[in-house]
Amino acid sequence: MATPLGVYLTTGVVGGGVGDLGLVLSGMAMALLFWLAQALLASVIAVTYHFTREPLAKDALNLLKGELYISRDPMMTLWLWVGVTALLFLFFLLLMRVAPLLAGYHAAEHQTVHAMEAGKPLTLEAVARMPRVHPRCGTNLWAIMQLSLVGLGALATWLSTDVGRYTLPLLMPVAVVLAICIAFGWRALGGWLQQYFTTRRPSAREIASGIRAGLEVTRCHLTIPPTERQHPSRRIWNMGLLQVALGIAVTWPLFQWLTGVLDRLLISLLQ
């Protein structure tokens, strides 16, 4: 896992690299990037409405705030929802790509894992030759979640129309085709996102962080007796997801307050 402090690796039984603080900071950084993406998109939409007085821009801003059925035309709501969702995650991906302390460590993490799985020595030269894309990266899961989110939102909006209700039986084969596309295409989409957005060519310092994490995991793994059983709660903690969730939870009230401040600023543009 990439954090602002460096790379964290785990087998579930043991972990290595940056400690819990780095994982908490990773959650805080992800929450910050997502809030910045929302703030930037909201600002762009508000400025667009201020200069054009286009009603769709105001609808899009309301939609971004969570009001789904805002348009008298459900199909227009569908296209607005898809467009706003796509732009929001595009902004998030672009911010993640340019974030100075995430994309490089993310690539170093993948390259280190590739080297370990291939039995290569954990040296700077060997790790640097490894690919940045990894098939088990969480970006792949994130990709399928976004595809499913857009698909479910589009389906809900379509079914709210008269045409949608009458064509409900025809949606079954369409749903099957979409499910097949998602099932076989999510890894490809996740790999593409990794290559162009969530990772970048790491520096020597970032690769060194991945190597330290890999060596620590290997050393800790070798010191554990084969018969030793670890409590499930410890395995869950070693995965690092709880620490990341804690970082998100800690920053949530702050970002809620900042959202309120931003809303008050944007109201002046909407008048």
Image (cartoon, rainbow, N blue to C red):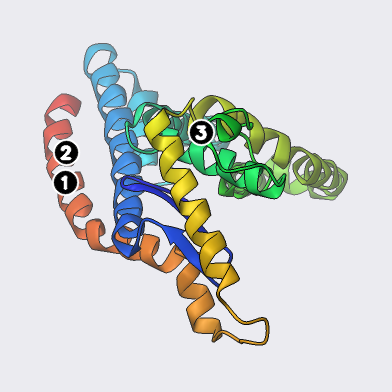
Image point (32%, 31%), residue name: 100
What residue type is disc 2 on?
Leu
Q: CA distance from mark 2 to mark 3?
A: 45 Å
Q: First in sequence: mark 2 or mark 3?
A: 3
Relative to 54, does residue 141 appear above or below in the rendering?
below
Name the side, left or right, on which 268 lies relative to 2: left
Q: Which residue is mark 2?
A: 262
Residue 186 or residue 196, whichever sits in front: 196
Residue 90 or residue 198, whichever sits in front: 198
What residue type is disc 3 on?
Leu
**Res. 160 visible in picture:** no
Tell which tag, 2 or 3, sits nearer the viewer: 3
The image's mark for residue 41 is none
Residue 198 or residue 9, whichever sits in front: 9
Location of residue 125 in the rendering, given as x and y in whole percent from the top left corner? 55, 29
Q: Which residue is mark 1?
A: 258
Q: Which residue is mark 3?
A: 124
Image point (79%, 49%), residue name: 168
Mark 2 closeness class: few <14, some 14–19, many ≥20 residues within 10 Å: some
Name the side, left or right, on which 262 lies relative to 157: left
